[in-house]
Image: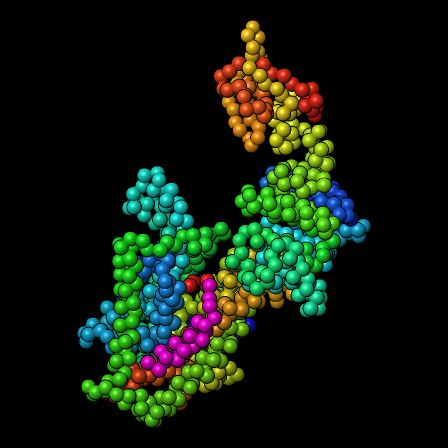
Amino acid sequence: MFLGLFFVYPLLSILTRGLTSNGSLVSPLDVLADPLTREVVWFTFWQALTSTALTFAIGLPAAYVLGRYSFPGRSLVRALVIVPFVLPTVVVALAFLAILPPGLDRGWVAIVIAHAFFNVAVVVLIVSTFWAGLDRRVSEAAATLGAGPWRRLREITLPLLTPGLAAAAAIVFLFSFTSFGIVLILGGPASSTIETEIYNQAVRLFDLRAAAVLSLVQLLCVGLAVWVTLRLEARVAPRRGVRSERDVLLAPQTARDRVVVIGSLGILAMFLALPLAVLVERSLSVGGEYGLGAYRELARPTSVLLATPYEAVWNSIVYAGAATVIAVVVGGLAAFAVASSRGPRTLDVLLMLPLGASAVMLGFGFVIAFDRAPIDFRSEPWIVPVAQALVAIPFVVRIVAPTLRAIDERQREAAAVLGASPGRVRREIDLPIVGRAVTVAAGFAFAISLGEFGATVFLARPDSPTLPVAIFRFLNRPGELNAAQAYALAVVLMGVTALALLVVGRLRVRRLGWF
Amino acid sequence: MLRVEDISVGFPETVALDGVTLEVARGEVLAVLGPSGSGKSTLLRVICGLQRPDAGRVLLDGEDVTSAPTHRRGIGLVFQDHALFDHKDVAANVAFGLRMRGDALSDIDRRVRELLDLVGLTGFERRSVATLSGGEQQRVALARALAPEPRVLLLDEPLGSLDRRLRDRLLVDLGTLFAELEVTAIYVTHDQAEAFALGDRVAVVREGQLVQQGTADELWAHPADEDIARFLGLGNVRDGTVIRPEAIGVRRVGAGETGDGVVESTRRHGPTVHLTVRLDDASLLEAAVTSLDHAAPGERVAVEIDPGGIVQL
């Protein structure tokens, strides 16, 4: 029901808007034939591919190290790697705006680097988990049969690793393909993807039909990508009898091992930490002097917003809190449905679609779907959390469902044999095991909602902006103080997100869908 | 006590059980022996209600429980790989069945301690089950199943995943425990040594059918067919006759003797040495001798058979 009203209906509205004009059917071909459209689609593919390649170049060495060696702090490294992934895209974009030299700070180079920063966690975590699950003895058997290190890599390790690599690549590609905040801020006028072009057409040029047609193109591409991703992931699903990491990981033994471990992780750490450090530095500097000026300024009303910037912090937290509740309830129920369905994975695909259908499409869909009585919801304050929840739900499902699926059926049987009724089994076995995953999912949902930009930018009312929206508004104004305030707000947003994740991080997590 | 009548279970590809009828008396341990894939585990799942039979009945104390849900049957099951609750500690695992029964908290505490003492895990209450060794997990699984005093205890290859020495020790412990508690139990295994060590009676299953049952002595004395004889490890099975290796004497031929064959190989089996002898009619015979001065491969020997060691099938 919830998904039907707030997801399917807006999509249908986009569909009608894209294919009709004044009540009659219109071919969308004119928009599709426009050279601008083709250029945008081409750039979207091209930058997503390049981003994926760069993400792998940076992530693979670390994935190898985390998948093959055990060393003190290994799990801490794995936890820290996730940080960029949950950072709001607006923050990531600003960090690279801050660190890249003028000239490079807008355009495809900046976009691709920022995407790599954002997605490197996906590669590191998926591939290293997969690597650690490979039985070392298979490769050792090859060695006893006379295969040298390169032979073993080529003939044993790579083929076994392929499903993991493919799944990670598909996900990174998908995220880069639908990325909005990063492209909008770092892209400049010349580099536009389908996603930002929808926003352009709808908000700046008011060509709703063109925006709708572009949305349909996006939906097609993304539907395809999601489908491929799920196919690939099905093969990565943890197999039974996978050896525990204890048996697979070895402590670094030779000096060479240590160089490899420290080197790969060091490079990764630099790549991840430096932009954030520079972001903080920039927020503290106004007019060449260091100080908290920009932060003090945030408490004052400004012409940029219809509220003080600090009020945006509060708005963000309230919206994100509400969105989290919705996402956990709806996503949790959906996870139960997904986990107990044994049939084809259509349900999976349906639930993944909001992720792929992209935040901008959702926001745009809401605007054109809920514009008439009795469902004129556009100015309702709760429409923002609803949209944010929709963006977060796929993540909730992805985190909770695998945990539910992973529960050994024999645990339930054992409980039944000991006298537990089916309801009791749910309470005693399923809930406690899933409880932790739900907490983590809630943390993720909160972080995602806090940083949600694509849908919120359509829906947030001018007098109650969220943090990412406020940052964006500041960024669009000239002047050094405005820029510094944007940086300062980005730091605040980063701080709130980090705080939320720290709370969740206290509850130790073992293994989650993607992570 | 427990009676299983004419149970059949079919899976899409195979027939798991085909008309199996069994009975276990109060305080009796029935060992169900069969190779893997013979339907043993399915039989246990039918008895405790985790698997619906296509045909047949399960009777507990004369009452038909075939369609009763698992949690109301009062039958205990020790799973093959223990299936302990990873998210609960040792005490909570053992207490689970007691809580389901609605026992008072103080009674539960007492009973948990009692059972952990019984299986030799005193003081393990707060340990996480993930930190236990295979043998300790097995003991927790046993304590958990015994705690609510099930009417019948089912054990599905409980020692299957343990190493041999540990297995031998637990086998003795289990035997003592069963006798002490007068447990009514069905013990499923593919290992004939385990089956004969624990079972008051042994039922042999093959391809979903019950092929023979009886006490250990009955089975050894009269295996129903050649397959069973081989499965029991009797050796020298041919033409409806089994000759026990221990009943065969082998000595080197003296001067002027023609002898019966040549020793092909020797193999030590603990205290006995198994000699494979190629007889002059080209057939093979396996003899078990205890003498340290036995014939070596290549030597010509004479063979004597003790008629008491010949079993007609």
| In-front residue for pair A303/B163 | B163
Q: Decide whether residue B127 is among the magenta residues.
A: no
In the picture, measured across the screen, residue B157 lies left or right of residue A50, that is right
Residue at image position (39%, 76%) is A498
Residue B59 image offset from top left, x and y in percent: 77, 49
Quadrant for the N terminus of chain A, please.
Answer: bottom right
Residue stretch rendered in magenta on the structure: A491-510
In the picture as drawn, the residue positioned furthest to the bottom comes out as A301
Secondary structure mainly formed by the magenta segment: helix
Specify the quadrant of the image occupied by residue A212. Answer: bottom left
Residue at image position (43%, 82%) is A317
Quadrant for the C terminus of chain A, please.
Answer: bottom left
Residue A67 image offset from top left, x and y in percent: 37, 56
Specify the quadrant of the image occupied by residue A416. Answer: bottom right
Color theme of the render: rainbow
Residue at image position (47%, 85%) is A381
In the picture as drawn, the residue positioned furthest to the front comes out as B292
Can residue A84 be seen here?
yes
Specify the quadrant of the image occupied by residue A448. Answer: bottom left
Residue at image position (61%, 40%) is B190
